Amino acid sequence: MRFQRLDIPTFPCRSANEDVFDHTTGEITEKAEKSPHTLDGLRGASKRERIVRIWFGERYPNALVGVPTGARLGAWVLDVDVKRLADGTVVNGFETLKALEDIHGQLPATAMVSTANGGRHYYFKHVDGVRNRGGLGAALDCRGDGGYVISAGSAMADGRRYDWIDHDGEGMPEFAEAPEWLLDLVLPKPFEASSAEWSGRLVAVGENPSWVAAAVNDELATLANKREPGRGGLVNRTGYKLGQFIAAGALDRGQAEADLFAAAVANGVVAKDGEKEIRAKIRRGIESGLRQPRLVPDRSANDNDWQGDSGAAARHLLANYAKRKTEDAPAEAPTDAIAEDLPDYQLQAVADLEALTHPGGLVQDLIDWIVSSAEQPNRTLALAAALPMVAALMGPRYSTGSRDTRPNIYSVALAESGFGKEHARSQIKRLLAAGHGVFDKFGGPARIMSASALREVLEAHQSVNCQIDEFGGFIRDITDRRAGGHQRAISTDLRDYYSASATYFEGAAYRGNPPKRIHNPGLCIHGTSTPEQFWSALSSASAEDGLLPRLVLFNVDTEAPAVVKPSADVRYVPTALLARMADIAGIDVVGQRTGNLSKIKLATTATNSPITPEVVPWAEGATSLFESVKEAVAEREKRVVPEARPFVRRIIENAIKLALIVAVGIDHKEPIITEANIDWAASVAWTCAAGMLSQVTERLSDNPREANYKRIAALIRAAGRKGITTGRLADRLKSIDTRQRDEILKDLKEADAVREETASTGGRPRKRLVWTGP
């Protein structure tokens, strides 16, 4: 437990090669010595005493102790190895190090560990930017952020050991500063942004080279500084975005390819994946971007264009994926994880959802347009509104995957009042209205009063987007155990519509009113609510309810957006945006308006027969990445509480839907799901699921008393150190029987989860309940 006392996270690693049975394939594979026992490896490294005792005391008593390097340790490690090749040749890293020291000077005295293979680890103080890196010289590499080493005190199964050199006391020895020559060797080379003078000429939208330069340089700098994992995917995404500028005539392709490759060299992915693979990713990304020319704002101020200074415009319209900050692994069940050579994908929730609001195509264009007219722009809320709108336009006409997945989606945005939920909803309405009748049928009802009423809507038009405010109250009404039959029927039908998009919905039969099939219903929902309203609704929901796991939840728990001067008028709807929507909806606008139905390419009114969809293919890289995503989700499912498992299981389906929506939004004529689409979609699906999972165990329950117990506990816990008065608690819990409320409070006090305090303010003493539990 020495590392826990030093506040250093650890995880167990194998002390010998080990045969492992793969339950998904039935195969037996060999795991190498020093690889993590746990599936989440260094990502799941823990400082919690209980978890560490289980790992090293019960499950893996002979395990090596793995320690993440970089910021988590406060040190990076120079690894000097002695490798014995298959032909008997010995590659000695000490010789490489000596040659470097002869040129630059001796390394300073610092913490050192002798390794099991006869090598040595040199520990140096953490420096931002030092990551895992090989190729420093023969048998010489380093471990920084994203890597790990085996700690001193570990012993291999055959007796070989890792031991401190010249240190036998308590705690960790002192880490020295690395010399400049060594940092020059291990740090990525500085990236020089491309010139602000671009060749080529902007087409149709005016000349604005400084705006383009600022935007492109921002993208390239983000790529150059990208850390593992996901560097390869980001190369593709950045290539796509620069391809959009090339298509607009604003950027020279040769210059773009050269700058992209230079940025990839800077972040180390060329050294890892090879020049051929990275140039291929750049080429594929640019080719995809060429299909979707970028709208570039005019230099001049114009109420009918997106404007602003180049830096602000670049940040608003073309900011790249922000650096991802992953959540710490949950403490209740040790999450599993990663080997020293990181797998293709790890489940990680993004701390700031805004980092995921640049997927490209029509979805991103809608986000950009929505926030351009907002006084408090919030891209996450705009994303939650854009996704179901694009999905409704697609309807059941697009499909992907072996399970015939269609794009219908239920998105829910949670944010406090004043964050901009209403603005996003209103702009979607303006968008539909601006079509002068072309898009009217895609707008569904804002309130669903009965299952039969919703059925009539979908019988008239099988693909609609319902924007529902106060969605938390709506969920409470239809999922509450005490809800009436008509209300519960709405919940049941919403669940069934979601699953029936690839087949048909038939619904319940009543006397004199036999069920009528609706083939391929494409119901989409955009719900908005305050967090308290929504989370409170979960307290009365049943753990068996199948609707809740189908929701893609965007929980905006950041500070309120800053008030800015909008760069566009709320009434301005770009014609190009409407044209893109019509293309994706399969509508010939001229034919629609003139009534010449022969010109309507693909109708979306309800039909009496199934719709044969266009099947969207997957790129090879997307398929392999998705297999890694499925493996990660399957492992995560094993380690959550039973009531949370339905939410984890839906991550895969939601990710496919999200990737499909974005892929068609990028190219509706020849859509293809790329590795970048899957990377983005999986990140969104898991981040949204993680937000729901954080509340599931506290809110969902198996019976009414348990639901009331969790509701009372949540209210007291939320009151914090000040507590909540018994009178205030009673006001908030009027629906709970007084006797049962008192019994639950008694149980909480006896379990030392709640303490009752009495305070006097000069009048009658007031009793306050303060949470003292975990």
Image: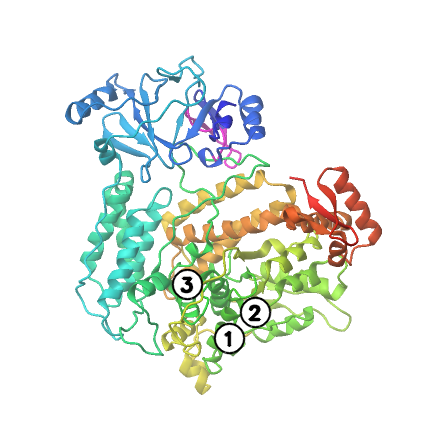
- Residue 386 highlighted magenta (yes or no): no
Q: Would you name the residue on which mark 2 appears?
A: 467
Q: Residue at x 40, y 83 (%)?
A: 590
- In the visual, does 404 lie left or right of 544? left
Indicate the quadrant where residue 72 lies: top left
The Cα–Cα distance between marks 3 and 1, rounded to whole angstroms, is 22 Å
* Amino acid under disc 3: Val
What is the secondary structure assignment of the residue under circle 2?
strand
What is the secondary structure assignment of the residue under circle 3?
helix
Q: Is residue 419 above or below residue 188?
A: below
> Percent x, y for residue 594?
44, 87
Give the foreground label among 2 and 3. 2
* Amino acid under disc 2: Gln
- Could you classify mark 3 by the number of other residues whose Cα lies within 10 Å: few (under 14), some (14-19), or many (20 or more)? many
- Could you classify mark 1 by the number of other residues whose Cα lies within 10 Å: few (under 14), some (14-19), or many (20 or more)? some
Q: Would you name the residue on which mark 3 appears?
A: 664
Indicate the quadrant where residue 645 lies: top right
Magenta residues? 21-40
The Cα–Cα distance between marks 2 and 1, rounded to whole angstroms, is 9 Å
Answer whether residue 395 is visible to the viewer in this image: yes
Of the pair 265 and 253, the residue shown nearer to us: 265
- First in sequence: mark 3 or mark 1? 1
Main secondary structure type of the part rendered in magenta: loop
Of the pair 227 and 170, the residue shown nearer to us: 170
Q: How many marks?
A: 3
